[in-house]
Image (tube, rainbow, N blue to C red):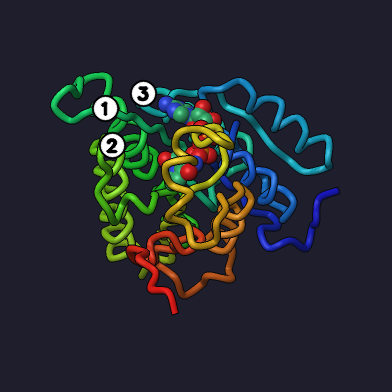
Amino acid sequence: MTNQCGRLAGKTALITGGASGMGKAAAELFAQEGAQVVCADLNDAGEKIAAQIRESGAEATFVRADISQTPDCEKIVQTAVQRYGSIDVFYGNAGISSHFNFHEMDIESHYDRVMNVNCRANFVLTKLILPYMLKQGKGSLIFTLSVNAEYGMANGASYSASKAALKQLIKSLALEYSALGIRANGILPGLIRSGMTVPGGPIEQAVLPFVPMGRAGEAREIAQAALFFASDDSSYCSGSMLVVDGGQSSGIRPQIEV
Ligand SMILES: NC(=O)c1ccc[n+]([C@@H]2O[C@H](COP(=O)([O-])OP(=O)(O)OC[C@H]3O[C@@H](n4cnc5c(N)ncnc54)[C@H](O)[C@@H]3O)[C@@H](O)[C@H]2O)c1
């Protein structure tokens, strides 16, 4: 059953990429904490997740949408507002990766596609959502970046650049809107098991040796960070970047035997 005394009781949370991985985990956790959840995703699996949340006694709506398309972004926001009245939390989480040798990069399918989904969509959705948050004088904007927002990525320049751009979106929003009650924060995950990074797959094999904790993170461990930013627990955080990476980005790791 829904926890009506939860940390997000009475709030409406819009989550992109809610059909899988971190977005799915956040949808389930936010609903447990009392939020009305709107999951937007390309993947129809989001319908089942919303249904399961409703069966648990909480409230959820799935919107099938491609966030790289502006009309779909409008549809997501309209659906949320028509159904629940406003939007208190926006979690811009959907993202895609793309791996290529830079000199062989195809601009349309590699660069444009990654930037449109990971970056442009969050600009569009934030612009559409802000008027509702401004009207109520409060709101929380959260974005899933990556440790690659801070570091380059061989064979993944578009991905790394798209996440670095989000960091400056967050910082700019924090400067512009914090005084008006709207906070903007980012989460920088490291290696997390999800649809993007499957157990034993090539990404996990390449990255795991550099994770001091020696394991990949679980989607729920990112959802907990998102809950922190969504709730009043983070009432003095705006423009913050929370790294959740098992220690991966603490530094290079030559270890001197003692
Ligand atoms: N998994 C990792 O190791 C890792 C690490 C750092 C950052 N991230 C970031 O975490 C976020 C969540 O990814 P995840 O790991 O949970 O992967 P995931 O593939 O499990 O989930 C991503 C979701 O986004 C949806 N999506 C993709 N393109 C979309 C579009 N155009 N419109 C609507 N929905 C779309 C997918 O359908 C999917 O449900 C992404 O932004 C990703 O870049 C992931």
At 22% from the left and 19% from the top, the residue drawn is: 108
- Could you tell me residue 93's position as x and y percent? 47, 42
- Could you tell me residue 148's position as x and y percent? 33, 50
- Could you tell me residue 185's position as x and y percent? 42, 60
Q: Is residue 168 above or below residue 114?
A: below
Q: Residue 100 carries which label?
A: 1
- Could you tell me residue 174's position as x and y percent? 33, 63
Q: In this view, does 248 lie above or below 216?
A: below
- Name the quadrant containing residue 20: top right
**Residue underneath mark 2:** 156
For the residue marked with disc 1, what is the amino acid? Phe
Q: In this view, does 18 lie above or below 227?
A: above
**Residue at disc 2, secondary structure:** loop
| Count of all numbered marks drawn on residues in the image | 3
- Name the quadrant containing residue 176: bottom left
Question: Residue 137 or 203: which is nearer the viewer?
Answer: 203
Distance, label 1 to label 2, CA atoms, is 6 Å
At 39% from the left and 39% from the top, the residue drawn is: 125
Mark 3 beta carbon near ligand 1 (under 8 Å): yes
Mark 1 beta carbon near ligand 1 (under 8 Å): no
Residue extending farthest to the right is 1
Give neighbour class at mark 3: few <14, some 14-19, many 20+ (Cα, 10 Å).
some
Looking at the image, do the residues carrying marks 1 and 2 touch, with CB atoms under 8 Å apart? yes
Question: Residue 54 or 215: which is nearer the viewer?
Answer: 215
- Indicate the quadrant containing the C terminus: top left, top right, bottom left or bottom right: bottom left
Distance, label 3 to label 1, CA atoms, is 24 Å
Counting residues from the start of the chain, the first of labels 2 and 3 encountered is: 3
**Residue at disc 1, secondary structure:** loop
**Residue underneath mark 3:** 69
Mark 2 beta carbon near ligand 1 (under 8 Å): no
